[in-house]
Amino acid sequence: MTVGQPVERVDGRAKVTGAARYAADRTLPGMLYCHLVMGTIARGRVTAVDTTAARAVPGVVEVFTHENAPRLTSEQHFMPLQGNQIHYNGQIVAITVATTLEQAQEAAELVRVTYAPETPKAVIADALAEVYLPANQEVIVGDPAAGLAAAEVTVKQNYSSPPHHHNPIEPHATVAQWDGDRLTVHETTQGVVNAQRTFATAFAIPQTNVRVLAPYLGGGFGCKSPVWPHSLLNAAIARQLGRPAKMVLARSQMYSIVSHRAEFWQQLTLGAKRDGTLTALVHVSTQQLSRTSENMYSHSISSRMLYACPNIHTRQQGVRLDVPTSRFMRSPQMASHFGLETALDELSYELGVDPVELRRRNYTDVNPTTGERFSSRFLLECYNLGADAFGWSRRNPKPGSTKDGHEFVGWGMATEAHDHSASPSSAMVRMAADGTVLSQTATQDIGTGTYTVFTQVVAEALGVPLNQVKVELADTNFPAAALSAGSGTIASVTGAVNAAASAVRTAVVQLAVSNPASPLHGLPAEQIITQHGYLFSPDRSRRESYRAVMARHGSPVQNTSTMTNARGYSTGAVFVEVRVDPRYGRVRVTRGVGAYDAGRVMNRKTARSQMIGGFTWGIGNALMEHTVLDRRTARVVNPNLSTYLLAVNADVPDIQAIFVDKPDPVSTALGARGFGETPITGVPAAIGNAIFHATGRRIRDLPFTQDKLLRELLTQ
Amino acid sequence: MTADSEFKRRTVLKAGSTAVTATFVATRTATPAAAAQTESSVDITLRVNGHDHRLAVEPRVTLLDALRERLDLTGTKKGCDRGECGACTVLADGRRIKSCLTLAVMRQNTEITTIEGLARGDRLHPLQEAFIRRDALQCGGCTPGQIMSGVACISEGHTRSADEIREWMSGNLCRCACYPNIVAAIQDAAK
């Protein structure tokens, strides 16, 4: 058995030696460098672009503006440089092209743009009169008004969270090369198949004329899911100029053209009986939308799927602002989940019921919105495992009851939950005549461990050692497979990989038992055992290696399989300890424990790392991460990593990850469910709840920065 | 001897052991940028991973861009190009520096060690091995910088406790957030 084991990453060696080639690492003969010029107004139009000085820079080959840029259509997004309208600050207004990066950068500084500006609106607070309800964004179950009327205790509170930017360490990069009307792109993408379609549509060429590769991706977190317009423009420039072209975004450019998590306001109203059982849950939210898109991603799924409540009302409102288009960012349901899990903590204090016990009392095996039974749910086990490991039973519930020197110590918890996607996927497995195995599928490893898990799946299905298997990913020449987003890679593609490997096993076993030259000749195929690279008779008295069977056969055995899977919902419970220094309002997270039901765990090592990563994102969202928009200019004022603060090493304590590890019976991914986005969701609320436990002060606006906490601590 | 020079000597000695050969590599023209010389270009020699590289660069070219776009040494990553993320960390005479914040012309007569120069043939550096064993990487975008920084953190002696490692490794951001595993890997390799 190798699936489930803590196998080391098979791509680890390439990544620790610098041998792994990412998109930006590609250089091609004759390649040109493209650099973007970003607009400086948020609303209005471009009246003139002076490129004279830019064109005079030695090495500059061309400067594109809306007047001479290639005409393109984007299937998903507003396409810049097709006209003079400006819809957000930091929109692409010109592109310089030069022989070296430095020349292109210098030229970009010299492009002079003149605007006819209009007054923009940047934040929800400035456009409350324009809040509206987009289509299909309201769900009502039961009779929420009656549920609230029947409540013995009610909690009604407002919560809010700021825009966030994904900030993968690898900036977006694209390298395009044409050969006639055939295009090859090295693209930082979470989905080569989607990317292939987007490029083909933009250039009106057959999809088969486009090859997209992304064997390594330096983090995505959602902002590399679509192909953004700059990549299409880069490819168009390569075609027009007849030379390969490379474009790598500057960090600051990633704050306006590759999406963000929307600013989010929400109001939670919980009605409950004295024993804690919920009678009504009303969740009204408002998220920031752009002028060019009304897609919403911060969904209130938790309010609709997590707790037993007969009367539920979720209403997801939007407001269109002069900002870039928002999109999903790791754990899009986190924003709404923060409100729900904080409101439950507030309810627990109203009732005098322990927060874990309150959640146990509202546990359900049934989806409260649809009435359908979950295929498997071990959330109660998560509460028990997490609470035991953390020592929750020793908690004195009284706020401010624990002090250590100057610092208050607080313990908080929250449920964690996120759904995962699943889309039909195909995979190929081929055993060569020398017995080595190759698997290819056009999904991606964005750092989550796909290469490693699929190596384990193939090795186990065939019964061969891990080092006999090579997995190749993220090339549109391979069988089409899922986008690596929505926690969907393992859930979507594992089944196809396993089916293809199993079919190859069956075929090779058949080759052995049907050939008189094999020691296994004449045995029933279904009784053959495969292990360690060998085929054994049922009593293990006879055996033959895969290598020997394949050498005799003399040619490869190959199968391509396709599989679908159901979407799923992975849950858990997270417990945190914080220390608050009341003199400075400073919060440190000093301990974290999470227990999860993610179905079957495919690799304990990579799954644990996913949990640590999620928990750390939760710390960042709770304590520091926020994009600041200037309300006057609608411009991001902190578009860099020294002012958009992420959690650093010193912010992260020891974290313990616990897995129930029971297969989901309906999952075709060998019982695994998607998991990557679950372990962030509850952390901001758990930290806020721990701060309340430590200090008796409740902050309802993320992040819990020192200024906010100090203000609370100094009043009263 | 001042504390500073002592510190330098120790780091130089440790890093020096990774680069003792003195082979010479002819001017590279593997990349278009390397071929593109302008009037303001100057001829320089960079000593990287024990090899001398002659190249012509404009004075404004950073060490990072010289490594990546001219010498095709792309293991060193560009995350922010302004010294904030640490992905471009390399060793200069054994000390960790951010290669985006220094110019190539300023780094002649400097022994540069990049991630490509850490292993001895097929044998990985102990910290590279520890990174794999402890799963101290996910996407790999920050990993070369983390490892180079970690090698220096160890040679500086900033590994007396997990908290000390956390503090001295906080200049290298990891968005996948492998921090506890990075600390564990450095503890392993420091033994």
Image: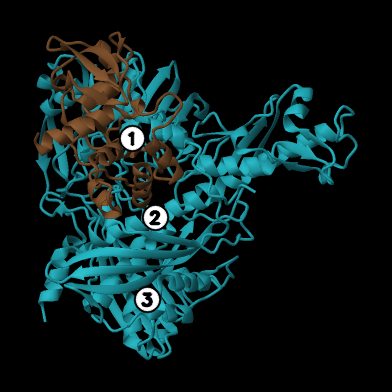
Chain colours: A cyan, B brown
Chain holding disc 2: A
Expressed as whole percent of the image width and height from the top left, the position of residue B91 reads 24, 30
Question: Mark 2 Cα within 10 Å, few/some/many (few <14, many 20+)?
Answer: many
Determine whether the residue tagged by mark 2 lies in a helix, strand or loop.
Answer: helix
Label 3, residues with CA under 10 Å away: few <14, some 14-19, many ≥20: many
Q: Which residue, given by chain and number where applicable, does mark 3 sit on? A: A282
Residue shown at the point (43%, 52%) measured from the top left: A610
Q: CA distance from mark 1 to mark 2?
A: 20 Å
Q: Secondary structure at mark 3?
A: strand
Q: CA distance from mark 2 to mark 3?
A: 32 Å
The residue wearing badge 2 is A612
Quarter occupied by residue A334: bottom left
Locate residue A662 relative to residue A85 in the image: left or right. Answer: right
Position of A142 relative to A14 (above/below): below
Q: Which residue is mark 1?
A: B144
Give the residue furthest to the front.
B1
In the rendered structure, which amino acid carries the disc numbered 3?
Val
Spatial separation of the CA atoms under disc 3 and disc 1: 48 Å
Residue placed most toward the observer, A485 or A657: A657
Please state the chain letter of the residue tagged with numbered disc 1 in the rendered image: B
- From the viewer's perspective, is the residue at label 3 or at label 1 nearer? 1
The chain under label 3 reads A
Q: Which residue is pictured at 59% across the width and 43% down the height?
A: A456
